[in-house]
Image: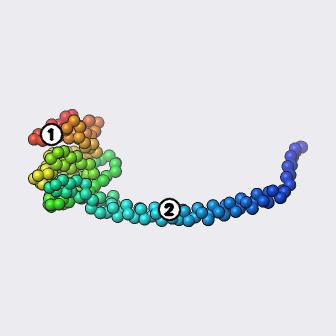
Amino acid sequence: MTFSIVENIRNHNEWDSVKGIFIGIFKFLILIILIPILLISGLIGFFKKEKEIAKVNEWTGFYSNENFKLNRIFIDENELPEFLDYPEECNDIYLFKVKSEPKISELEDKFIDYQFVTDENGIYLMSFNPENEGMTIWYIDNQKQKLEKVKDIQSSWWNFGKREGKIILETTLNRKDIKLEIKKGYNKELC
């Protein structure tokens, strides 16, 4: 059996030594400049994250007019009540506790969904109710400052918005598209 071997030998010269020194100095300078920048940016990111966490755990205003103001506080996902009637399909749940100024005591025991819709006279909210009781749509009139039940609905991931001057809720449940239109004075359910 025969083997073919190719051997390649390169001699180092002075230029290789100079090049190695410059590359070493360049790496050292980059490390001296980069390390403080990375440390400072890490500290800034840490303090920003702490501020964001503090903001999440504070009451923040989300609706106000000349007569009253609504504040909400986020309920951490680890503290979500287990006794509520959540939709069966998995999704992110964002719940809030809401309080008002002046105080509307009926709001204190409600777990409010993150979605809300306003009109010229007030605000619509959705709450998760205890198990097997679904959800409820609520309305607070700016003048009356009273929580009024609009409609009990099935627990689902509702899209809650305003179109063409109407308050619209839409979802898909059991392979059925459900659409609710809310108008003042009466409610009309479309399937």
Q: Amino acid at mark 2?
A: Ser
Q: In the image, residue 2 lies at what x, y percent? A: 89, 43
- State if disc 2 and disc 1 touch (CB < 8 Å): no
Quarter of the image holding residue 14?
bottom right
Q: In the image, residue 177 lies at what x, y percent? A: 26, 36
Q: In the image, residue 5 lies at what x, y percent? A: 87, 46
Query: Split into 4 quadrants, where in the image is the C terminus?
Result: top left
> Which residue in the structure is indicated by mark 1?
183
Q: In the image, residue 118 lies at what x, y percent? A: 21, 46
Give left or right: position of 111 versus 32: left
Residue 134 in sight here? no
Foreground of the two, 143 or 185? 143
Q: Residue at x 31, y 63 (%)?
A: 57
Q: Amino acid at mark 1?
A: Lys
> Which residue in the structure is indicated by mark 2?
41
Foreground of the two, 92 or 65? 65
10 Å crowding of disc 2: few (<14), some (14-19), many (20+): few
Give left or right: position of 30 versus 150: right
Q: How many marks?
A: 2
Q: Residue at x 29, y 59 (%)?
A: 75
Spatial CA distance of label 1 from label 2 is: 52 Å
| Above/below status of 109 relative to 189 | below
Secondary element under disc 1, as helix, strand or loop, is strand
Q: Nearer the viewer, mark 1 or mark 2?
A: 2
